[in-house]
Amino acid sequence: MKGQLKSIVVKGIKFFVILVLIDIVLGSAARFVFFTQRSGKFYRMSHAFRQADGDVFIFGSSRSSHHYHPGILDKTLAINSYNLGSQGQQILYQSTVQKILLQNRRPKLLILDISPDWLYKSQDAYDNLSELRPFWFRFPDIIGPVLSLQSKLQKIWLFSRSYQYNSTIVHILYYRIKPQGDLKGYVPLLHIMNSEDYRVQRGVDSIKFMSEQDREFDPAFETAFSDFLKTAVSKKIAVLMVCSPDIRFKMEGHNPSLQKIMEIGKSYGIPLLDFTDDPYFAAHRELFNDTRHLNDLGAKIFSRRLCDRLRPYL
Amino acid sequence: MFFNSIQYILFLPAVVILFYLTPLRFRWLLLLAASYYFYMCWKPEFIVVIVVSTLINYSSALLMSGTSVQKRKKLIMISTLVINLGLLVIFKYLGFIAEMFQTIFQSDHPSRISPALLLIAPIGISYYTLQSLSYIIDVYYGRRDAEKHPGIFALYVAFFPLILSGPIERSTHLLPQLREKERQKLHSVNIEEGIKLIIFGYFLKLVIADRTSIYVDAVFGNLPRHGGITFMAAIVLYSFQIYTDFAGYSAIAIGSARLMGFDVYQNFNRPYFSSSIREFWTRWHMSLSSWLRDYLFNPLAFSFMRIFRKERYLKIISPEFLTYAFAAFITFFICGIWHGARLTFMIWGSLHGIYLIIERAIDRKTGKRLLNIFITYIMVLFTWIFFRSDNVHDAFLIIRTIFTQPGKLYIPFDSDVVAPVYAVLGILILLLIEIKREFFDLKFSFTKNRNEYVRMITYGLLIFLILYLGVFDASQFMYFKF
Amino acid sequence: MEEQAIMTGLEKVFGEVFHDSVIQLKPDTIVSDVEGWDSFSHIRLVLAVERSFKIRFTTQEIQSWANVGDLCKTILTKTR
């Protein structure tokens, strides 16, 4: 028994050392590969966190990344803007990214593209924070607590370098083979919604809309949203909330989450631009990729129309 | 608590350490408490079913061995079988209703229930019932004595590594081990082998099963929008999903038991390298197929043997063949039902039964091994269409579409494209491992190398692959627009 | 009949069923020791043994065999 125990302990220690070595070597390789990307969503994030400088930063989920064309904003308004929109990310992510950016930058204006459901409880909002994992070692104080929201044990997992780069390699390879153009964070969608798409997706949307009516709020999201506004106000950086065009709903009288968002915004004196009642987009389905997203043409038109209404805030 | 939960990763080492600290004669108590706790983490009330079933089987076995009147013995055996099967039927049907409600209320997430666990409503009953039945039948036929110690028998029924999804153990194999002193001594080989199996199990589950399910669920969640090529891709991925999911759970189960010195039946042995359906069933879900062979097929066959006594039927069919055909078909039909109360499972089982009969009739022995492996795999793939489909209508829709509208391969869009790529990557790694083990095992062994550093580096790399490529949270399920 | 005679007789039957004339049986031979011993040949085997020794087994008897030795014992009691 004693001899066996000793042999197990010795083997265990050896195995642990080997594990740590493998993790350091291959984890570092994974980290190296990760940070040498030149295209794709992770590249956009790492570029935004480190280099991107600008007067105007645009925050939001996929609707933001597909709608705001910084090239057009820059040209028309003679500014320097960057689009931080990120697929599937909600307000927890936005407020984290804001904290990272404002560590050493002083932009003039933050545009927050509002998604109406942001305050509802959502497991996805937590799950998708995983995309921040690769950047944890750079901003442990900011990203650490956010990842702990997923689960308390994240701290332990993050000891492993390989884990920090979990599920990144195929993205990296994919965008190395098929690079996306660098449009300062803007990702164009190229499909033109046809009537069949519209019919099918409207059906899905309306079911979703009905099921959303009695969803609960997540207090952590409300706090994150207030934080976002509070931080900007305290640093004297202007914030503008925008509802970009959406074929699914009119902002007015929409769901309780959106009403709450507007309420909180008002309490901080944040102006709001509403494009959901813009008849131009409602009348032109061909400007959409699907019911939730404008396509490239739609995004360009929207960006131009936005410029006109943006001038007073600059 | 599932094997792929963080709780289990803490629970298992705790139990193993306590196990070796506990004196031998109290270990059954520790394991029984741990097993009941493990079971109750899921739905505490179902423990009642286990306890009742355990008590009934325990006492009827004692009753059987206490009587020498053959008629009485038989009566006890049959009524015990009826009670066991009755419980199974009642709870399995109730379980299905519960599951239906579950799917209705969680309809915004595509089904994330893993295939191995679909068989567990209320958790594990399909497994521990078979385990108890084999015990009763073995005692009846005198293949073993009735167990006198109620605690050890209860542990045999509820042993936590096995209760969720097998392997299905036998009273002649596992029960004696529960009191073997020599076996339960701390031994470094057991710890190493256990850990190796568990690591491999997690690799199968996290790197392959959970990845493949993303694409499969997306396609099956929206059948009308896809073409035949997409269906074929989804079925191929599903064949790996169900294999790695199930084999992964089994490996973790066997490894967990091994940590405490127990030797549990192997459940999967690279089934997709079988050259015939007959061979497939000796390598796929082996603990179930051997159970069915011993407790269903053989009794059926011997009954039919007495019925078919002519020299030849229809001038060409031998009575042996006829016996085999009837017994095989019924066995696999019931095997289908065991998987669930659905027509699709019955068709799946029947197809395997028919395959076996045809194989027996043709008696195909020649041909190249690789070709046979390929043919067998295609035949199995076809049956998975039924196994995965929610209903027969869907299954036939898929088959029709495959032959009539190939369409284009569905590749999820933009950044979503990566999900199936991860799945394919995982499958390629698995194939490399399996081809090596199947065809070149003698050349150089990584996992059983005499040099411990080679073994350690091999498993270290496997852990790296799990950490780097595995699915750890639901974020990978996102952004699948269908 | 003697046990040795039964074993020799069984070896002959096994040889016919499994197309293998050099099968060596021991009392502790089990299913996995004989190549090709599967469900189908098991049926054929039981029938062939019954024919060869001119006996009939009950289900109880067939079910109680764990190895060739058990089979041999059953035949022994039947032919005595």
Image (tube, rainbow, N blue to C red):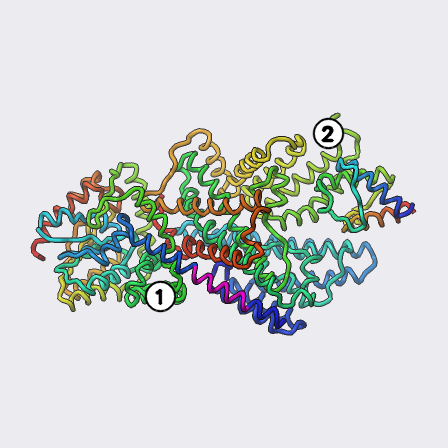
Q: Please rate how many residues cluster around mark 1, counting C-alpha atoms within 10 Å: few if below 14, some from 14 to 19, many from 20.
A: few
Is residue A93 shown above or below C58? below
What amino acid does circle 1 point to?
Ser
User: Which span of residues is magenta-colored?
Assistant: A9-21
Could one spot residue B83 in this view of the protein? no
Q: Residue A285, located in which quarter of the rendered image?
A: top left
- What residue lies at 51% left-to-right and 49% top-to-bottom? B244
Q: Residue A280, located in which quarter of the rendered image?
A: top left
**Residue A264 colored in magenta in the image:** no
- Residue closest to the eye, A21 or C6: A21
Secondary structure beneath dot 2 equals loop
- What residue lies at 75% left-to-right and 33% top-to-bottom? B319
Secondary structure beneath dot 1 equals helix
- What residue lies at 29% left-to-right and 44% top-to-bottom? A202
Q: Residue B464, located in which quarter of the rendered image?
A: bottom left
Which quadrant would the C terminus of chain B be assigned to in this image?
top left
Predominant secondary structure in magenta?
helix
Whole-percent x and y of residue C41? 73, 39
What amino acid does circle 2 point to?
Ile
Are marks 2 and 1 in one subunit?
no
The residue tagged 2 is B317
- Residue closest to the eye, C12 or B99: C12
Cβ–Cβ below 8 Å for labels 2 and 1? Answer: no
- Residue closest to the eye, B296 or B5: B5
Distance of label 2 from label 1 (alpha carbons): 69 Å
The residue tagged 1 is A148
